[in-house]
Image (tube, rainbow, N blue to C red):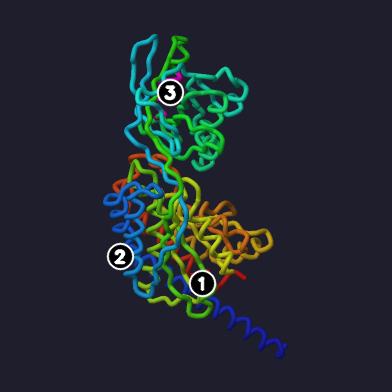
Amino acid sequence: MWKSIPLIALFLLSCTITRAQTDDDAFVLKRIHTAALENGKAYSWLTYLSEEVGGRLAGSPQSKQAIAYTFDELDKLDNVAAWKQKCTVPVWERGDKEQVIIRQNGNIIKELDVLALGYSGATKRRGVQASIVEVHSLDEVDTLGYALDRKIVFYNRPMDPADLIPFHAYGKAVDQRVYGPAKAANYGAVACLVRSMTQNLDDVPHTGVTIFPEGTDPIPAIAITTNDAEWLSTQLRKKSRTDATVITSCKAKGNFKSYNVIGEMMGTVSPDTIILIGGHLDSWDVGGGAHDDGAGCVQAMEVLNLLNEIGYKPRYTIRAVLFMNEESGLGGGKAYADSARSTQTFHLAAIESDAGGFTPRGFSMEADPEVFTRYYRKANSWLPLLEPYGLSMSQGGSGADIGPLKSMKGLLVGFRPDPQRYFDFHHTRNDRIHNVNERELELGAAAITSLVYLIDKYGLE
């Protein structure tokens, strides 16, 4: 009995130390959140990106402004080294305002509010005019086949309004935008209309990329609003001949040099091990790219700022990466991963924020199966510290730009803010700073910084 007393004392001492560590960590997380809400820079950075720079298509003059601005802001931060990393990006220009004019029995009945999809083809000056055929899937296009020759194909499959997770609904509907125009072109269609990707019924068109494989000549590909999609479908059911005139002047200009922007805080113990936080600096040209993905970029930058604010010296190197060209090819993400592989730079964790600047809800995680279970178990041990901030963890996808790092066997993390309003603004003219709540944006930055702190302090083994 007496011999067991030292073991009991050792157990109690261990519990006391663990409790003290937990209390200390809780205090640090509170300091991170306080610093974000009182001294955060993310909202002012995002205001400049959204309102002064604006939409930032890869290779555009605005993208170059964004590169210069974020590099300078990172370079101003204490204890942060900033540089630019070369990448190659495709360049596409929208040209003049697109037009879609609907005629019925030869008479103009409506001009739609539209946006050309990224990498849409151009028409001649007077456009193309043809009758409209409504479809709801790519399989239906295959079934109709060459009956679509010299027609305008209208994809009208809604995002499921009953799906509780909007990103799931998007994933089930977006194939018609990404691959639908090329599919229609292969059967001789002269243009394509696509219902906007949102669960809302509204009057705002949503652009986004469409892909024409090599050997497929791009046809005009146009996003129409969900309200116009409903209206047009009704007109087509009336059996009257319904035509559209489509006018675009888009132009693909080839591949050009651009840059990722990187800022890092050097580790004090294992500087060759990286914890990455990233977002994509490019955005569509029609709004300010505030939620998609200026928010993710400034949150990555804010992590470095907040670590400075609380005086934290990281064990590992903390690196903020603002990727170029996520929207139309992942040029920046691929260049970054190629560099990491060639230099054998180990990324213990990579966190991507690309779901808007809304209230933080948690993180989804993935990794190579060889390491995922133990990484995920370790991360879940921190839930008692994160749950008071409304944060949870789940298995799931991370992010497009960090995806190429998966083979390096680090933990890939997707930051998950509340998703319900994201597709109100995604790829639209309304993706502007006035639709971003400053407090929500900063709480997201604090949530990411909290996870970075815990990974840096405890590792993942």
What residue appears at the point 41 percent right and 49 percent down from the top-left corner? 58
The residue segment tinted magenta is: 225-233
User: Circle 1 is placed at which residue position?
Assistant: 456
Q: Farthest residue toward the left?
A: 52
Instruction: Give the CA separation, mark 2 to mark 1.
Output: 24 Å
**250, 47: nearer the viewer:** 250
Quote the CA–CA distance across marks 1 and 3.
Answer: 51 Å
In the rendered image, residue 269, in percent from the top left (x then y), is placed at 52, 80
Quadrant containing the N terminus is: bottom right
Up-down relation of residue 369 to residue 157 (above or below): below
Q: Given the image, on which type of amino acid does mark 2 rest?
A: Glu
Does label 2 or label 1 sit earlier along the sequence?
A: 2
Whether 259 is drawn above or below 105: the answer is below
Label at residue 372: none
Mark 2 or 1, closer to the camera: 1
Q: Amino acid at mark 1?
A: Asp
Circle 3: residue type: Glu
How crowded pointer 1 is (Cα within 10 Å; few <14, some 14-19, many 20+) is rated as: many
Q: Is residue 31 magenta?
A: no
CB-based contact (under 8 Å), mark 1 and mark 3: no
User: What is the number of the mark on residue 230?
Assistant: 3
Residue 77: x %, y % from top left = 34, 70
Residue on which the image places disc 2:
38
